[in-house]
Image (cartoon, grey):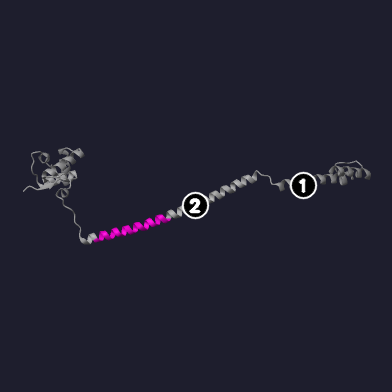
Amino acid sequence: MTQNVLLEEGGSVSVHTRIKDMCKEARNRLGLTNQEISNLISERFGIEDFSVNTINNFFSERSKATTIYTTGYICAVLGISIDAVFGIETKISSEEEAEFIRQLKDVKVELRVREQQIRHLEDLISEKNVRLDQAHSALEHYRRESESNTHKVQPWVFIATLVLLVLSVLFIIVYLLFFDVGNPDYGLFRNVRFSGSDLRNTFHILSRFIH
C-alpha cells in the first residue's frame, strides 16, 4: 500500500516522491553533487565508500521507492526532517508541560520586575536631568551677572576714590605750607624762608581758590 501525504494546495503525492522532491530542492540550494552527497554520508556515518549509484537511483525519475536507510542518510546530510514529512510531532509529558508553564510564569514575573526597575531608573534619570538643567541655568545666570558687575563701576567706588584724591592733595598742601616751608633745614624747600604774613597770605589765597 502506497503512503500519500497531503499538499498545501490540495491533492496528494506519494511519500517517496515528496521526500525526493524535498531532497532535490535542498541539493540545489546547497549546490551539492550526488558524489559530494555520497562523500558526506561516508564521512558523517563512517560508511566506507557509500555508493554514488545509490544516490543516483534515489534521485532518478524512474525510482518509485528506496530503503529507509538510504533515504535517512540522504535526508540527514541535506537537513531534511522525515518527521516533518510524516507529520510526526514531539510529545511532552504532562509533568514536563506543567514545569515548562511554571518556568514561563516565573520568566514573565521576572520580566515585569525588570520592567518596573527600568521605569524607576528612567524616572530617576529624568529627575536628575531636570536638576542638572536647573543648576546649569542658575550657573549661567550667575555668570552673566558677574560679567555685568565686572564691567560696571559702582558709584560709591567713584566717590570714595575722589574723596581720597582730594584728601591726599590737601594733606600734601598742608604739609608743604606748615612743615616743609616753615623748616628751611629739611624737606623740599630748603634754605627758603617765609614770614608769618607770607604764610597767612598764601593760605588765604588757597582758601579762596578752594571755595
Please give left or right for residue 125 compared with residue 90 in the image.
right
Image coordinates of residue 19 in percent, x first then y, are 14, 44
Locate the C terminus by quadrant. Answer: top right
The main secondary structure of the magenta stretch is helix
Q: Mark 1 or mark 2, which is nearer the start of the sequence?
A: 2
Q: Residue furthest front?
A: 10
Q: What residue type is labelled 1?
A: Val
Residue in front for this viewpoint, 169 or 42: 169
Quadrant of the rendered structure where residue 165 is?
top right
Which span of residues is magenta-colored? 98-120
User: Disc 2 vs disc 1: which is toward the camera?
Assistant: 2
Residue drawn where x is 53% and y is 51% of the image? 134
The circle on residue 130 is 2
Camera sees residue 48: no
Residue drawn where x is 62% and y is 47% of the image? 146
Image coordinates of residue 96 in percent, x first then y, are 23, 60
Instruction: Name the secondary structure under disc 2.
Output: helix
Instruction: Name the secondary structure under disc 1.
Output: helix
Image coordinates of residue 71 in percent, x first then y, are 12, 45
> Distance between the Cα atoms at labels 2 and 1?
50 Å
Binning the other alpha carbons within 10 Å of mark 2 as few (below 14), some (14 to 19) or many (20 upward) gives: few
Binning the other alpha carbons within 10 Å of mark 1 as few (below 14), some (14 to 19) or many (20 upward) gives: few
Residue drawn where x is 17% and y is 42% of the image? 40
Camera sees residue 208: yes
Please give left or right for residue 65 compared with residue 143 in the image.
left
Residue in front for this viewpoint, 163 or 39: 163
Q: Mark 1 points at which residue?
A: 163
Image coordinates of residue 102 in percent, x first then y, are 28, 61
The circle on residue 148 is none
Q: Which amino acid does label 2 sit on?
A: Val
Quadrant of the rendered structure where residue 177 is?
top right
